[in-house]
Amino acid sequence: MREGGLLVAGGLVAGVPAALATAQVIRAQLYGVGPSDPHVFVLVSAVLSIVTCGAMALPAIRASRTDPISTLRAE
């Protein structure tokens, strides 16, 4: 989970400034939202983080339920 969290944090650090820069370019396509609306950025970042944590948690839960001895013997 830590490695995935670092990837999410790195993506947010790189993505938010890129989104701010491109929002100025596509200003005409934004209806009812300002190009640098903080509520939208926080909401999108939160949704993406929650989805990513869910995608990381499911395999981690499955892996934690597996008996390591039986897995090692199978290999």
Image (cartoon, helix red, strand yellow):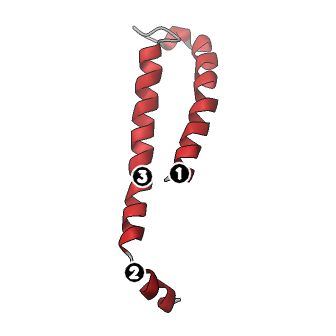
Disc 3 to disc 2, C-alpha distance? 22 Å
Towards the viewer: 26 or 73: 73
Q: Mark 1 sits on what residue?
A: 2
Residue 71, given in percent of the width and then of the height, sits at 46, 84
Q: Mark 2 sits on what residue?
A: 67
* Foreground disc of the pair 1, 3: 1
- Residue 15 is left or right of residue 38, and the answer is right
Residue positioned 54% across, 10% down in the render:
27
Disc 1 to disc 3, C-alpha distance? 13 Å
**Pointer 1 or 2: first along the chain:** 1
Residue positioned 58% across, 45% down in the render:
7
Q: Are marks 1 and 2 in contact (CB under 8 Å)?
A: no
Residue 22, given in percent of the width and then of the height, sits at 62, 19
**Pointer 1 or 3: first along the chain:** 1
* Foreground disc of the pair 3, 2: 2
Q: Mark 3 sits on what residue?
A: 55
Crowding around mark 3 (Cα neighbors within 10 Å: few <14, some 14 to 19, many 20+) is: few
State the SS at label 2.
loop
Crowding around mark 1 (Cα neighbors within 10 Å: few <14, some 14 to 19, many 20+) is: few
**51 is higher (above) or lower (below) than 35:** below
Residue 49 lies in what quarter of the image?
A: top left
Towards the viewer: 55 or 31: 55
State the SS at label 1.
helix
